[in-house]
Image (cartoon, grey):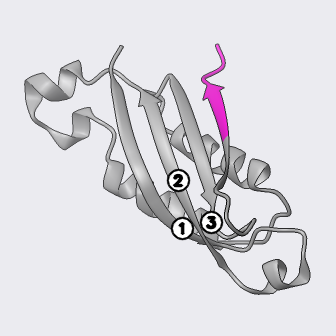
Amino acid sequence: MDRMYVSRLPLLSLVGVYLHEKENPQPLYLDLSMKISLAEAADSDDLEDTLDYSGLCHDIQAAAAREHCNLIERRLTDLLEIVLWDSRVEEVTGRLYKPGAVPGAEISVERTLKRSA
């Protein structure tokens, strides 16, 4: 099985438990690794035969900007579920970064979701 990657996708999101985090969108960054067959697209050279990563990134950025959530774990899960909207994606691993959450440290969470049988 092949993989498609998105690295350091910039997001603005209302995420956090503190008042200032609920009122002011924060920059987040997302890395994705998607398990998907690329064979048909490689043969056809047709966008219809693969995952439109531009559209996917737009959908993820729009979703991240919607309503507030307390934890980056929840935000990451919601974003990974968007990737699985495309039935060709068998599995997605994401890492969501929250820069500035702790001075001097880089905070991130990682999850993998698999398509249910």
The percent coordinates of residue 38 (x first, y second) are: 26, 24
Q: Quadrant of residue 68?
A: bottom right
- The secondary structure type at the circle numbered 1 is strand
Magenta stretch bounds:
110-117
Q: Nearer the viewer, mark 3 or mark 1?
A: 3
Q: Quadrant of residue 35?
A: top left
Other-residue count near label 2 (Cα within 10 Å), few / some / many at <14 / 14–19 / ≥20 = many
Q: Is residue 36 above or below residue 18?
A: above
**Mark 3 vs 1, N-terminal side:** 1
Between 102 and 6, the one lying in front of the other is: 102
Q: Which amino acid lies under the numbered mark 1 shown in the image of this protein? A: Leu
Q: Residue at x 65, y 38 (%)?
A: 110
Q: Which residue is mark 2?
A: 30
Q: Is residue 115 magenta?
A: yes
Q: Which mark is residue 11?
A: 1
Mark seen at residue 99 = 3
Amino acid at dot 3: Pro
Mark 1 vs mark 2, CA separation in Å: 8 Å
Point out which mark residue 49 bears.
none
First-in-chain label (1 vs 2): 1
C-beta proximity under 8 Å, tags 1 and 2: yes
